[in-house]
Structure formats: structure tokens, C-alpha cells
Amino acid sequence: MKKNISKLLGAVVIVGALAYMFQTYGVGEKLGRLVVIMEDIAHSLKNAKHAYEDVNFTISDDELRDIDIVKISKEMQSSIDKKKEQRAEVKAPPQIKADEVRVEEQPQHNKTAAREAKIVKLEDLPEKFKPLKQYLHQPFKMGACQICHDSNSKNPGALIQKKIQDICYECHKTRYTKEFDHTPVKDGKCTDCHDPHQSNSKMLLKADSVNELCMKCHDAKSTFEAKAKKLFVDMKLEVKHKPIVEKSCLECHDAHTADHKSLLSFDGKMDLCLDCHDKEKEKVTHSKFKHGGVNTSQKKCLECHNPHATQHKKLLKKDPVATCLECHNKEVKSDEDGGMLMNMKKHFDENPNWHKPIKDPKKGCSACHEPHGSDNFSILKKSFTKNFYANLENKDFFCFECHNESKITKRVIKSNENNVTSFRDGEINLHQLHVNDRKGRSCRACHDEHASKYSHLIREYTDFNGVKFPLRFVETPEGGSCAPACHKEFAYDRVNPKGIGSK
Amino acid sequence: MNLLQIYLRVVLLFCISAVSLFAEDKSIEILAPFDKHLQKELTVNVVMKFDKKNFDTIKISTPAQMLELNVSSSKSTECKNVSLKLGENIIIIGGYKNGLLVDEKKRTVYVESQLYHQFKYPPQKFVKTYFHNEKNEKICAQCHDMSVNEVKGVAFADVTKSNCYTCHKSINKEKYGHAPSTNYLCTSCHNESNAESKYITKEPSNESCFECHDENKELWGSAKYGHEPLDSGNCTRCHNPHSSPYSMFTRKSVNDICIGCHKDKSVEAMNGSKSACNGAKNNKVCTECHTPHASNQPFFLKKISSEVKK
């Protein structure tokens, strides 16, 4: 019994001691790092694009002369001591103005004799540490391992500082202290992205390109567990934002630190977008009628667009109509006149016959509306009239972009003519009858420009001074009849004319 | 004065109904119109209550119409619409059984018109009376839904579903109908109430008209000269707000309306005068040259006179 207790106590003590060792000497970290390095070397050996001989790793005498390793390490030691004192005094990171840190400082080494310095010849490096890649980290290139590694330690991989970022910041004096830091930067994990020795890409990245590196963590399928899933980006979708494809993620994002959320240099909801999208900037900022969806919404541009990749044209989150109906699925207050805009989703659901352009999957609502803002009411792309009465003759109205004006304003239609309106009583063009003169009616008096239950997009109700009057339209094979508020039931027939105004 | 009359009428009505409860009454009771009623419309609803055992035929005669009604249905109350003419109308309601007159009732109704001098000033004994108040409606409400069932801002798809339609369909029988009326959105204009009626209109009428015809208000308001009926706010003097056989719902044909006041411009008068109006001589429509509402030209001409004279 006693033996058992003493064994248990002994085990506890040993485990405790081991844990203490691990903690103080960072054994785990070092081992982990070694494994990572080994893996990487194995990977690069496997996929090496350059033959060993091709890589130019020899350093000229001049270069070597320029490096004073001893001095550098002394400087480092003194600065580390200073840091320790400083940290003891103030725990909060120093406040550096954004502009000051923007210019990345390139590490400069003193031009003093370095011959006596303890330089490791690259040829002498163990096989697994041989420089095989295109870009080499300057100290690694020089064989100045002791800038980072502790030469006195028995562990060959031991670093002179426990925290990697402390080593990096010694030379790379740029401090990333803007409002928003990239999480690896904040956590001091420089080597999560950068390889401290060598890489096939610029900036010593741990991937072949910037995008590839980013997607290591930010791909929806990656094992990276970000705090919020919204940090994932699915770049496999069909429609991709051009800058990402043609350049890189860094077109918009800063890899390290930024003044705005999502590591952006401008406000990502709108300002950043308008920095490139000049046409939209003009519309969004200067048009007479603005779209609340862009100008006053919470997410601005991102209400409708995905900045990375989607399945839909124009980087829309959903298909064009569905995108609009995200908000217009209820009555929405109009910024234009303070009135209420109708519930379009309900309207489209209830009325199966849609205006043709809306059905076009490429256009949707934007066939007629300019979603970024317009000088025409209801953010229409071209002018139209809001009035019930509007003489349509010789007017530059939007409808005539697609619909032939003469078809509507021509008074008499001869029987042998082709491409004529169906709304005729024998030879009399009933469209003309409705739209001519001072009390000519606008198209919208009878037609619903969005959707209707009836054919020819005939409205169920005409709105006249805030009162909805049913049109009571009935279609017959060769004509039809209407009994709106304007007149009693009048019928028309294309083949056997009924005479205007007849019942 | 009106209150007293109403009071008396109500008392009378009560007496009659009380009597009818106890005694076998062989008379026809006329619920509407009230005697010495004054109105503008050329039709009136006659509401009669009688014991159907006592009658087989009811004859209603007005100066404009004769109506014979067979009492065969189970109803003991009948509501019939009859036409009237301008001026004093004596409505005789006779109840017959086997060709013999059993009971006869008379009602005098005056139809006024502001367009004719002779019908402009009705005799003082005629007063505008109203039917739609709680007490009268109670009688009808035994069988009819007397509530307003229109939905504000949406017209009936089928107007026969309107509760008003049942009794007031005749006012929309003419060719040209005013939208709120033909769609039975009655309370668009009949939107005031007082002790006598629930559905009176605003006076003068223009206030109601301009609620919809607001663009005209601006157009005419800014003109230099305004026609008196418009200026005094009496749109309904010339226009019938319900329906009319004439376009623009005018109460008479355009020239008839004009000559109603401007007698000196009739064809007869013009032929004997040296006046410049060739249009009237040739019996043209006055509104070809004149605008009836407001104009910037003298004589309400549509264009300046030199152009018109051609």
C-alpha cells in the first residue's frame, strides 16, 4: 500500500518536473518546429523545381565582409535586455501612428568586417537544411544561423529567443499595430506564413503564391478553426472577383495589419469598392435618387455582392431577382418620397406572368432599375412618367426602348399591315385612343410593369388617386373587354369590330 | 325646425307601427320618400310596407313613369326605383286587389336644378330630407345589411357585392359613369355625417372633387378668369357626380347647360342679334371655343379671340 503511494508520488513528481521542463525550455515548441522544418524540407526535396547545382547559394566575399555577426548579436542582446526592462515597465504595446509604420523597413546590416564571425558554410549544412529554393532568407543565405539560433545550446534547433516574433522584429523593425491585426500577427506566429529559411515565392511565403497561402486557412474546407466561420471564402465558385484572380488577395487585404475591419485599407462595405469601381462611385454618390440598399443599408455594397466569389453574375449573392427580393420581400420605405414601396416578393408570387426582362437570368430587376442610384424616379435606367395622364406621343420614354412606339401611337392600322398591336378594334388602334392628347394615359395605367395575373401584363387594379379600381379585363380569342373606372364595359374585336365604345 | 319635423315624423311613424300591430291595417305604409322631399337626382326610391294579403297589384305613377308591381313574392316590403322629372313630382302609390283600389298614398317630391331658372328656387315647403339615419335604417336592417362594406382604397371587383348597390344601382344606369360612383366607393364623397344622415357630402362640392382632380385645381386656380360655378365651388351644378347620358357627366348636353344660364346665347337669340358668335348661330358646341372652367383669355376663350374668329 505504502509502496504504491510512494510510487504514485514519485510519478507525480516526475510528471511535474517534466512539465516544468517543457514549460521553461519550450521543448514542445522546439520539437514541433523541428518537425515542421523536417516536413518542409522533405516536401521541397520532393517537389524541388531546381536541381541542387542550379541554386546559387554562394556568397561573395564582399557580402560576407559586410556582415558583422558578433556585433549584430551584441546589438540584439542589448536590445533584448532593453525590451525586457521596457516590458516590465509598460505592458501595453506602444502606440504607433498608422502612417509611421506603413513603410516597411528593410533590415540593414552594418558594413564591418565579418570574417571572424562564426559563419556556417552552406555546403556544410546537413543535407536536410540545404538551400534548394529560389528565395532565401538573408541570414540563412549568409549561413548566419546564430542570428536566430542559439549556437551554445545543445539542441541544434534552439532559438535565441523563446518567441519567434521577438527574433523577427529584431531586424524587421516594422511593428504591426494598426487597429486590426491579422490573427497570426497578433499571436506572433510569423512563421505560420513565412518560412524563415527559404521559399519558392517572394516574401518567403510558405506557399507558391499569396492566394494559395491565404486559402490554406481561409478555404471553407480547411481545418483551420477560425473564431467565426464567416472568415471562410469559397474560391471554387464560378464567378470570381477579378483582382483576386489577376493579382492576389493583397489587392484589397493587408496581410499584417490595417485600419479597417477585415484587414482593409478603406471601409470594406463601400469605400474600398468605390476606390476601383468609378462608374458605380458616380452613381452611388451623385445620383438624384439613391438606392437605400446601397446608401443607407447596414452592409452597403456587401448587401448584394460577395467580394470574393459567387455562382452569379456581377458577384451577386443570389440570382438577380432573388437578390432584390432579399429586401423587397416586405413593404420598404422609399428614400425618394417617404412613401412605402410595395412588397415585390408577394407581388411576384401572386402574379405568375412576369415582364420578360425580369425573367432574364442575366438582368432581372436591373433590366430597368439601376441598383446603384439614378437620376430617374424609382432608380429607373431611363426616364418615365409617374403621372396617370401622360401623352405618350413622341416621348422619350423608357418603355419605347424595347416596345415600338409607332405600334402604340399610330391611329389607323390597315388590315394588311404586319407587326401591329393586338389591342385594336378592326382597324382602330385602341392603344392610340388611350394614350393620345392631354388626357392620354401612361402605360402603367393599364399595364403592370412587373407582373400580372392577366395576359399582356394587364393590371388587376388601376391606381387612380390612391384608389384601386379593377380593370375587369376579359380576353376573348379575337379581342376582349374592359370595365375599368374610366368607362363602362367596352369590348373590342380584331376581326369583327365592335365599334368604339360599344358594349 | 328640422329637428321638430323629424321628431314629429318619428312620432307619427311610431304611432302608425303601433297601430298596425294591433289592428288589421289595409293601408300601404310609405317609408320613403318623405313628403315634400327635395332632391337633385332624377330618380327616387319608393319604399312601401303593406300586408300582402290585402293587395295583388301596386301601381306607382310619377310624371315621368308608370310602374305596375305584382304582389306575388313573400315580401311585405317593396323598394322600387322610379324616374322623376325636374320640378314638382306627385308620386301616387295605389294598392289594388282584384282590380279595385284598396289604398292610395301620395308623396310630393321636388327635383331642383341649378341649371334652369324655373327649377332653381324650389317652393319653401320642400326641404331636403335624409333617409340614412339610425332610426330609418332599423326598418331596412331587418332584411338588408345596412353597413358600408367598401374597402378603403380598393374598389369592388364585383360591384353587386356592395351593400349600397342594392338600393342605389339606378343612379349609375346612364352611359357615362363617374368612377367612384360606378364602383360604389360612395363614401369617397359621402363622407360627412350629421344628426339627420350618416352619409352627407361636403358643401360646396368642389372640396371633394379636388381630392382626386387635383391637377385641375392647379390648372384652373392659376387662370386669370374663373367661371362662376367653379369659383363658387359648385362642380355638381353642371356635372352629375354619379352618371349621365352625356360625356364628362354633364347634367345636360353642353349647349343646354350653357344656355340654361346664358339665355341670350341661344340659337334663337343669336339669330336676331349682331353678336360675333358664329358658333352659336351654327349650333356648334360652345366648348369648341370656350372653356367652361377657367381661362386666361376674356370670354373664357380657349385661344385669343383673333384665332378663334376664323
Image: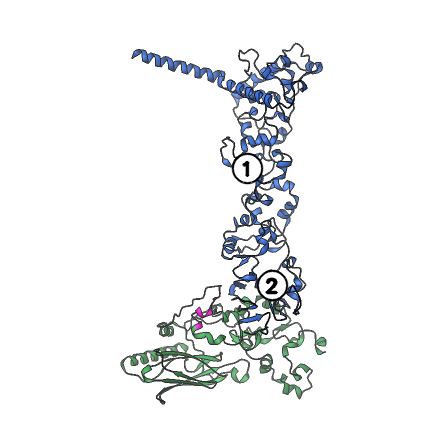
Chain colours: A blue, B green
Q: Quadrant of the N terminus of chain A?
A: top left
Protein chain holding label 2? A
Q: Is residue A190 above or below residue A296?
A: above
Q: Magenta segment, which residues? A: B145-165
Q: Is residue A453 above or below residue B9?
A: above
Decide which of tag 2 and tag 1 comes sooner along the chain: 1
Q: Quadrant of residue B107?
A: bottom left
> Residue A110 location, x and y as percent?
67, 16
Nearest the viewer among A395 and A299 is A395
Is residue B162 highlighted in magenta?
A: yes
Protein chain holding label 1? A
Three-letter amino acid code at the position of disc 2: Ser
Q: Residues within 10 Å of mark 2 (few under 14, many from 20)?
A: many
Residue B234 visible from this viewpoint = no
> Residue A444 location, x and y as percent?
58, 61
* Element type at mark 2: loop
Three-letter amino acid code at the position of disc 1: Asp
Residue B195 visible from this viewpoint = yes
